[in-house]
Image (cartoon, rainbow, N blue to C red):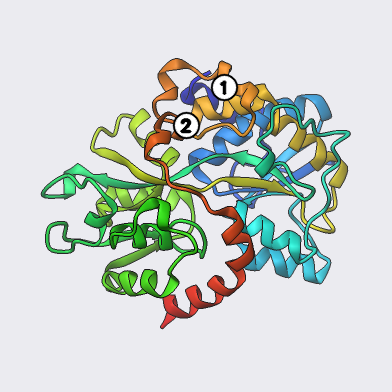
Amino acid sequence: MDRREFLKLSAAGLAVAGMGLGRPAFAQAKALSFCSWGGSTQDAQNAAWGVPFTKDTGYSILNDGPTDYGKLKAMIDSGNVSWDVVDMEAQTAYQFAKMGLLESIDYSVVSRDGLDPVLNTDFGVGSFKSSWVLGYNTDFLPAEPTSWADLFDLKKFPGKRALFKWSGMGALQMALLADGVAPDALYPLDVDRAFAKLDTIKNEIVWWDSGARSQQLLASGETPIGMFWNGRISAMQQEGMTSAKIVWKQHIPGPDMLVIPKGAKNKDAAMKFLAVAVSAQGQADFCNATSYAPVNDKAIPLIKPEMAEAMPYSHRSEEVAAGLDFWAENVTAIDGRWFSWQTA
């Protein structure tokens, strides 16, 4: 199925009860709360995973989002957890696991077969593999950018810049790459140098906190250039927006994971949802609709040939290292500095 077919399924209500994020249209006796990033990505997750999950278990899916880490931690700390499954960035999932905030995965329910071992842990499983890419809208720029350095060139490329609000993989690496650091010399990150580079465009940054918001910023021209998830721009292209473009040079992996918060009310059902999500067919259906890459290698033969070119694994020669080990060790310290810098 292509992306349009997926959206038709969702619209028909086969996967989701209450398509308004966080506000189900009607109550269900058996409902699983799924928090993700909204927009086309969450629509595809619901269609690829929610449809078969609902068919197999009778549970409807109640959507919420975008993922908010502060809100999630507050839920867990209070013991009043309203989300059963959460899609979150891999480095933050590692951080939450170290803090004891996640349920252990029951691998008697969730199959490990074919899963990426880096994203197949005691506390979570891979959701999908995205990449941070330089995205731009040709309708609002005087020329076409070719590298991260162009994001910082306010003279050649005037206008606001779209950057992801939350701390984590992406912004610091792309700042260092733009400043001339070689991809194989990124780690350990020179955090001081990265923030100094970001200072040069700070007044021109528009922050986005959901994939849907990032698409709005780019489509409207409010931010004609910025850092984006590759799948969000691909979705815009599939919908006919030919002015939305991707620069794959030095794209930065940004894998997501699915986790079950400590104290989730529907833990057993959540495990079954994860089993569907990471299955070869579930991953293939989702990735064919979004251009994100699968976390299950057995899904790759099921990817449509015309979709493969839009996926990060087709551009591996341009990919820089993710540095998950570095982030897992340093994310707390970087978080503190990031938010202090952002609000200063």
| Viewer-nearest residue: 125 or 316 | 316
Q: Which mark is residue 259?
A: none
Identify the residue at horizontal 12%, vertical 58% (top origin).
156
Above or below residue 102? Residue 45 is above
Which amino acid type corresponds to the residue marked 1 in the rendered image?
A: Ile
- Percent x, y of residue 257: 65, 46
- Percent x, y of residue 204: 27, 68
| Viewer-nearest residue: 8 or 314 | 314
Helix, strand or loop under label 1: helix
Q: Which residue is mark 2?
A: 313
Q: Is residue 43 left or right of residue 257?
A: left
Q: Which residue is mark 1?
A: 300
Q: Is residue 339 left or right of residue 228?
A: right
Given the current orientation, which residue lies at the most extreme front position?
185
**Where on the picture, by quarter, is residue 197?**
bottom left
Given the current orientation, which residue lies at the most extreme bottom position?
344
Above or below residue 245? Residue 209 is below
Identify the residue at horizontal 33%, vertical 57% (top origin).
177
Q: CA distance from mark 1 to mark 2?
A: 10 Å
- Percent x, y of residue 273: 76, 36
